[in-house]
Image (spheres, rainbow, N blue to C red):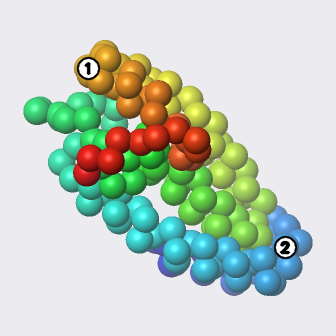
Amino acid sequence: MIIIVPLYLLFSPSLSWFHIPIPDWLRWLGVGSSAFSLPFLAWIHYVLDKHWSSSLTLQEDHALVTSGPYRRIRHPMYTVHIVHFFTWVLVSANLLLLINYLLTIILIFARIPKEEQMLLDEFGDEYRAYMKRTGRLLPRFGHKTNRKE
């Protein structure tokens, strides 16, 4: 799907009405950025391991993951999704994907507070301390992080 959908959007003549004029060099930058973001997503899933779920649920014996990409960012998976889905907009130069992207951003920003509340309820002060030393979607600069991995 990661390859087929953008290729369809690039080469489907029936979607020409939805074309956004994006320069070719910027579309190619989107291709490169897309490819660059996928290893980060794999790393995130590797670090989360059994603690990942598509729904807002905690697994049995759930532990707070604060290593790897989670050392500086509380929601690196959402950061990668925001970047990766934007690359689809660039590559496809398609208004429909832009609308889908904007809706995805809204859903991500609506989900984050619910997820953080769930983690606060489960981990309490440990999660509060983690929130103080990490950024939500980007690293918090100028703050020392916990070096334990």
Does the rendering let one see residue 75? no
Residue pointed to by mark 2: 22
Residue 56, by quadrant, is: top left
> Pointers 1 and 2 in contact (CB under 8 A)?
no
**Residue name at image x 26 percent, y 20 percent:** 122
Disc 2 element: loop
| Tag nearer the camera, 1 or 2 | 1
Let me know if residue 95 appears in the view.
Answer: yes
Q: Position of residue 92 (x, y in %)?
A: 70, 72
- Where residue 122 is drawn, which disc sits there? 1
What secondary structure is marked by label 1?
A: helix
Task: Give the amino acid at mark 2.
Answer: Ile
What is the quadrant of residue 104 in the picture?
Answer: top right
Indicate whether 118 appears above or below 63.
above
**Residue reaching furthest right?**
21
Tell me if mark 1 has few (under 14), some (14-19) or many (20+) residues whose alpha carbon lies within 10 angstroms of its own.
some
Q: Earlier in the sequence, mark 1 or mark 2?
A: 2
Is residue 91 shown left or right of residue 44?
right
Rendered position, 18 above or below 99: below
Three-letter code for the amino acid on which mark 1 is drawn: Glu
x and y percent of residue 101 in the render? 66, 52
Q: Which mark is residue 9?
A: none
